[in-house]
Amino acid sequence: MSEGSERRGRLLLERERDVRVTCPNDGWTFAPRYTDGRCPIDGWKAPVDVAPPRFAQIDWFWPTLIAMAVVSILMGVLVVLAYVRA
């Protein structure tokens, strides 16, 4: 493998480091990502963007259920076609 492809692969696997903020009221250091941007002790709001990634905001239950239903119907059609043509 070339050095460039190894570096690209490493960059894909690395996670972005969590932003850590220190509350000025109590000195508590926390990751606002897990506390909706607020200090867990006194509720101070951190001045950082804590919106989750776009795909983390989607409820994947219904799209997955629909995809499995479509695949199941297609598999059923294939089985019937294979049975009829055999």
Image (spheres, rainbow, N blue to C red):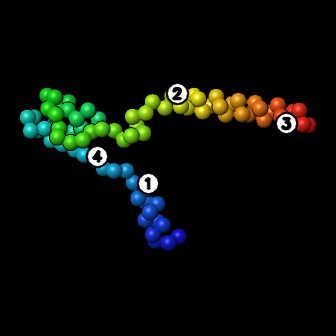
Q: Earlier in the sequence, mark 1 or mark 2?
A: 1
Q: Position of residue 70 (x, y in %)?
A: 65, 31
Q: Which mark is residue 82?
A: 3
Taking the spot 85% from the left edge, 36% from the top edge, the residue there is 82
Cα separation, mark 1 vs mark 3, equals 42 Å
- At label 1, the amino acid type is Leu
Is the residue marked by circle 1 packed among few (<14), some (14-19), or many (20+) residues within 10 Å? few
Taking the spot 53% from the left edge, 31% from the top edge, the residue there is 63
Cα separation, mark 4 vs mark 2, equals 30 Å
Closer to the camera, 55 or 18? 55
Residue pointed to by mark 2: 62
Please report contact status of discs 3 and 4: CB closer than 8 Å, yes or no: no
The residue positioned farthest toward the bottom in the image shown: 2
> Taking 46 as reference, is 65 left or right?
right
SS for callout 1: helix
Cα separation, mark 1 vs mark 4, equals 15 Å
Taking the spot 46% from the left edge, 60% from the top edge, the residue there is 9
Q: Earlier in the sequence, mark 1 or mark 3?
A: 1
Closer to the camera, 60 or 27? 60
